[in-house]
């Protein structure tokens, strides 16, 4: 059966070029980068080159890049690592930020969780008014993993700088899909994850602007300039760096390709199925994100029917798929729980083709029609269903 992966916000396949780049670093150049002999020096050089590549991809200095185990660790390090009093964040952050904030609330910090509008946007004016004398850090994600909304990061960064508050952004979903400029956006710290950009899992980075005071979470041999002890995952880091440089190299063609597929999917669904709504912002949106709400349909049932046809999508975010709790992001944009349960996230990737989208558009009306026909949510006498099938 044809299998189509449309869950790139959950993870991506490792690019074949990235795999090739990593292979020598398992059995040949396997040294510990801290060792003084030639094996160690080879590993150290590979690490240095990877750091330069990631720094270049971000427009940063090598001394500002700290390799971590991924987005979750980078988010934890950014928030727990700085002296925190009051933190400002939003209600739609990734659990790596939200649950870190909840932890910090139990350890003497105060957190303001800002609301978002129906498109998922934070109002920079609200950030400005939330700033207090003891505010230490503002953490707002660049782009949302569920609905793809892109925040006004430059405006937020300016507010942070003008008020002498640190600004952290989780750029795990946005890197390679929308422009990031550390200087123009006044970003002090930024989280990246390799497996969302066609690199291996279990590796990522935190950018920390030179001069920012930050304490480690991991104590040990003093790796990563003392900020992140633990023998470096050289193969993973080399792969991550390759993935980051490919993301920059392919930025324009990737975004053009993804935007075309996104519009094809959204317009195709709207044309063939009634009572469908786009969740999130119509224009300030990641090029690869399509989050649709199908009235009178149970999202989980739809996911399973799509899976039977070889199509992989998600409801809510992968992190919360084990729980039946409605998505905190969709709640924050004002959806009622029954609407949330009818929402499906399609996230497109570099390897998807227009044939993939045609296949999805071919099977969707039938699935929606079938589910609506048996749905207790459809009111009696209404003739709702898909118009074409
Ligand atoms: C996936 C994701 C993370 C977590 O990254 P991991 O590398 O899986 O730990 C954090 N933030 C966002 C926005 C994500 O999409």
Image (cartoon, grey):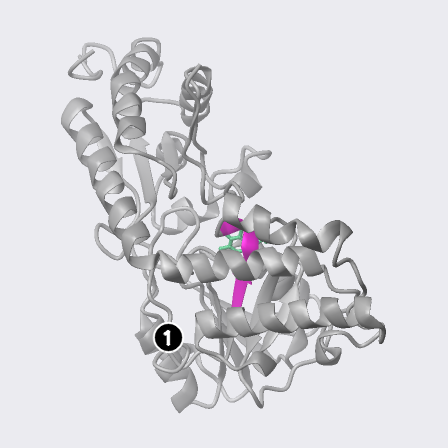
Closer to us: 196 or 123: 196
Closer to us: 380 or 331: 331
x and y percent of residue 212 in the render? 58, 86
x and y percent of residue 144 in the render? 41, 54
Residue 192 is inside the magenta segment: yes
Residue 162 is inside the magenta segment: no
Closer to us: 145 or 83: 145
Q: Quadrant of residue 279?
A: top left
Q: Which residue is mark 1?
A: 181
Q: Quadrant of residue 131?
A: bottom left
Q: Residue at x 40, y 51 (%)?
A: 332
Q: Is residue 99 visible?
A: no
- Give the total number of marks visible in the rendering: 1
The stretch in magenta equals: 190-196
Tell whether 208 sits left or right of 45: left
Q: Residue at x 35, y 59 (%)?
A: 116
- From the viewer's perspective, is residue 337 above or below residue 90? above
Which quarter of the image is occupied by the N terminus?
A: top left
Q: Residue at x 35, y 33 (%)?
A: 339
x and y percent of residue 316 in the render? 45, 39
Closer to us: 35 or 382: 35
Q: Residue at x 41, y 16 (%)?
A: 309
- From the viewer's perspective, is residue 221 above or below residue 114? below
Please tell me whether mark 1 sits on a helix, a strand or a loop: loop
**Label 1: how many Cα within 10 Å (few below 14, some 14–19, many 20+):** some
Q: Quadrant of residue 109?
A: bottom right
């Amino acid at each position: 059966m044809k299998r189509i992966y449309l869950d790139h916000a959950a993870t991506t396949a490792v690019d074949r070029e990235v795999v090739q780049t990593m292979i020598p670093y398992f059995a040949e150049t396997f040294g510990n980068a801290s060792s003084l002999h030639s094996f160690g020096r080879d590993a150290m050089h590979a690490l240095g080159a990877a750091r330069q590549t990631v720094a270049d991809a971000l427009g940063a200095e090598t001394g500002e890049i700290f390799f971590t185990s991924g987005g979750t660790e980078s988010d934890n390090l950014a928030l727990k690592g700085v002296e925190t009093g009051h933190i400002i964040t939003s209600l739609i952050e990734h659990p790596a930020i939200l649950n870190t904030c909840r932890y910090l609330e139990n350890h003497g910090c105060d957190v303001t969780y800002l609301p978002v509008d129906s498109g998922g946007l934070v109002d920079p004016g609200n950030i400005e008014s939330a700033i207090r004398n003891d505010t230490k850090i503002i953490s707002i994600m660049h782009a949302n993993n569920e609905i793809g909304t892109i925040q006004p990061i430059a405006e937020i960064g300016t507010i942070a700088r003008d008020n002498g508050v640190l600004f952290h952004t989780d750029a795990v979903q946005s890197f390679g899909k929308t422009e990031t400029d550390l200087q123009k956006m006044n970003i002090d710290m930024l989280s990246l994850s390799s497996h969302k950009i066609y690199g291996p899992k279990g590796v990522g980075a935190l950018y920390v602007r030179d001069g920012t005071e930050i304490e480690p979470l991991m104590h040990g041999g003093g790796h990563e300039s003392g900020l992140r002890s633990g023998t470096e995952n050289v193969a993973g880091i080399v792969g991550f760096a390759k993935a980051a440089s490919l993301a920059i190299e392919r930025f324009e063609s990737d975004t053009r390709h993804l935007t075309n597929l996104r519009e094809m999917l959204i317009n195709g669904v709207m044309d063939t199925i009634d009572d469908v709504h786009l969740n999130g912002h119509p224009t300030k949106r990641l090029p690869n994100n399509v989050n649709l709400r199908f009235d009178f349909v149970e999202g989980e049932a739809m996911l399973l029917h799509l899976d039977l046809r070889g199509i992989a999508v998600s409801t809510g975010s992968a992190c919360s798929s084990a729980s039946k709790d409605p998505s905190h992001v969709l709640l924050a944009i004002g959806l009622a729980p029954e609407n949330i349960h009818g929402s499906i996230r399609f996230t497109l990737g570099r390897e998807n083709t227009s044939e993939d989208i045609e296949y999805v558009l071919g099977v969707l009306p039938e699935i929606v029609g079938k589910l609506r026909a048996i749905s207790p949510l459809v009111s009696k006498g209404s003739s709702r269903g898909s118009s074409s099938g």
